[in-house]
Amino acid sequence: MRVCLNTQPGGASLNEDWVAGTPSLAVVLDGLSTAGLSTGCSHGVPWYVAHLGGYLTVALADPDRSLSDGLSEAIERVAARHPECDLSNPGTPSATVAVLRQGATTLEHLVLADSPIVLERAGDYEVITDLRVDGVLPELQAEVAGHETHTPGHREALQRLVHAQREVRNTPEGYWVAASTPEAAYHALTGATPIGEVQTAAVMSDGVSRLVTEYRMADWAEVFKVLRADGPHGLIESVRKIEATDPTGRRWPRYKSGDDATVAFCQW
């Protein structure tokens, strides 16, 4: 498996995405925004995703270890790195997870929350994603969407949403992400696809997938055309050009003018 990757921050803040690729593995993490609220942790989201990604890559180098077991171990090992922090805080640093691993005959996948994996299969596209978060607190999501970004109303509405999301995060009534509880790994979507059925694949954060899913300025065929011609960097630049036409989120309401954006493009 040949993996080409790129990640770029959405603005002046540190990038809270993380990506890695090996000849058999592609991993994308998307750190969850804190919206300026307390996390109980002195290290921050970039620290968390870097450590989680490193431990996860090591754990999944063992082809006999399941993706869920590897993620569970990685979450546990990160928690052990900062016991002085309040890991019971519902806002403790957390991340979405998307993993694609090549085995002897299949491509295994794991998706936890809304960072998708897209498989190109004979001109068709299979999108593997976990959208449970979209069904949580729709009224507060709509309230955020009613404000343009960079306004006090938007900031306050976003904080109310994030605070409420934290109360149902990693619970059966809500949605699941990687944070400090290893159990979350076993709520991920997992599966396998015969290698011969897949032409190419893309593992990405929702800062990129929104070009199709939210902005509707491209379809998956166009996305993969850009990836083949200009690679992940070219695709992220396409997203940025679209966002620049709507800097305050009037046409496409969103949490940030530009989100961190990451792609791992896999070819055989």
Image (cartoon, helix red, strand yellow):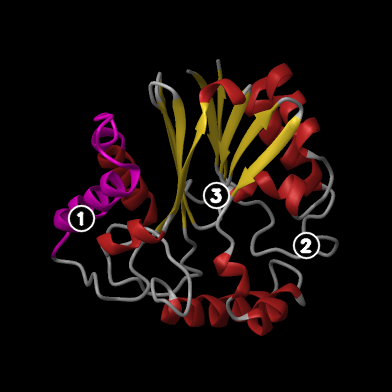
Locate residue 56 relative to residue 188 in the image: left or right. Answer: left
In the picture of the structure, the residue carrying the numbered disc 1 is 76
Mark 1 or 2, closer to the camera: 1
Q: Residues within 10 Å of mark 3 (few under 14, many from 20)?
A: many
Residue 50 against residue 171 in the figure, above or below:
above
Circle nearer the N terminus (1, 3): 1
At x 62%, y 69%, the residue is: 134
Numbered disc 1: secondary structure:
helix
Quarter assignment of residue 141: bottom right
First in residue order: circle 2 vs circle 3:
3
Indicate the secondary structure of the residue bearing disc 3. loop
Taking the spot 30% from the left edge, 76% from the top edge, the residue there is 89
Horizontal side of residue 220 vs 9, given as left or right: right
Residue range of the region highlighted in magenta in the rendering: 57-83
What amino acid is at disc 1? Glu
- Indicate left or right for 128 with 150 as reference: left
203 magenta-colored: no
Q: Is residue 138 visible?
A: yes
Marks 2 and 3: which is nearer the front? 3
Vertical side of 69 occupied by 221: above or below: above
The disc labelled 2 sits on which kind of residue? Answer: Gly
Q: Residue at x 27, y 65 (%)?
A: 181
Q: Which mark is residue 115?
A: 3
- Callout 1: few (<14), some (14-19), or many (20+) C-alpha neighbours within 10 Å? some
Question: Do callouts 1 and 2 mark residues in contact (Cβ within 8 Å)?
Answer: no
Residue density around tag 2, few if under 14, some if 14–19, many if 20 or more, within 10 Å? many
* Residue assigned mark 2: 249
